[in-house]
Amino acid sequence: MHLQPRLIPTHVPEHPEGAVLLLHGGAAREGRMAVSPTQLSVLRMIPIARRIAKAGRGRLAVYRLLNSVRGWDHEFTPVRDVEWALDSVQQQHGELGTCLVGHSLGGRAALMAGGHTGVRSVVALNPWVYPTDDTDLAGRRVLFVHGTEDRIADPARAETVARRVARRTDVGFIQVPGGKHAMLRQGGVFEQAAADWALATLLGEQVPAPVGRVLAGEPWLTL
């Protein structure tokens, strides 16, 4: 069976000024299982998508991507699905500036696909990364938001990758004390940070702290 990625619209105005693409996480399963719309890693992105759509006040097209298969291995990475989704959004809306927002392995996919044409900014929420990961995101604005109590995606790994990415472009890193991988504790902090980063980088809006402080020149923050 040949599995295909899918785009799920959250809010699509007639004349959007920017686009946001949300990328879920999720571990690999034996046999290259299809992604279910009801798996927890997918459901976690719904409130973030809704928060961004509401904050955009009809100016942003907001989509969620369902990957073709679960996980990330040597034969498949979600980056291909993200690139397909970005091309699809451009076909639908033209050359809109786009913000990628990913959680866990979706955060890693956002970072790795962030050099694609049209991507203006990236938000990596509790990204699951290797400390050796590297990607050229020159010209993009990149934000990491990581809970200090994440026991699945190591915050120290994320910091290492963030500092490497920062050699080529502007990077912010917000530490969320007590935050865990699923973003259930202090979930509003993660959601609002993603929404504010999209508003600031796509629409040029002034946003409050903590994202406002990052954009004002305080790239490394602990809340």
Image (tube, rainbow, N blue to C red):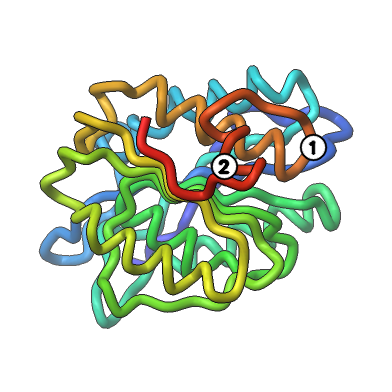
Residue 3 position, x and y percent, is: 38, 62
> In the rendered view of the protein, which quadrant contains the N terminus?
bottom left
Report whether residue 65 is seen.
no
Quarter of the rendering containing residue 54? top right
Task: Name the mark nearer the viewer: 1 or 2.
Answer: 2
Compared across the picture, whether 54 is left or right of 204 comes to left
Q: Is residue 20 visible?
A: yes
Nearest the viewer among 139 and 38 is: 139
Does 99 appear above or below 1? above
Mark linked to residue 203? 1
Which mark, residue 27?
Answer: none
- Expressed as whole percent of the image width and height from the top left, the position of residue 49 reads 52, 30
Q: Nearer the viewer, residue 215 or 182?
A: 215
Please indicate whether residue 48 sits to the left or right of residue 119 in the image: left
Which residue type carries mark 1?
Leu
Of all residues shown, which one is farthest toward the right?
15
Q: Is residue 180 above or below residue 186?
A: below
Q: Label 1 vs label 2: CA separation?
A: 17 Å
> What quarter of the picture does the C terminus occupy?
top left
Picture residue at 53% right of the left edge, 75% below the top: 167
Q: For the point 61% across and 60% down, which residue is it?
A: 170
- Total labels drawn: 2
Verify CB contact (< 8 Å) between mark 1 and mark 2.
no
The image position of residue 36, as x and y in percent, is 30, 42
Could you tell me residue 124's position as x and y percent? 43, 50
Q: Residue at x 47, y 56 (%)?
A: 5
Give the residue type that dot 2 points to: Val
- Residue under numbered circle 2: 214
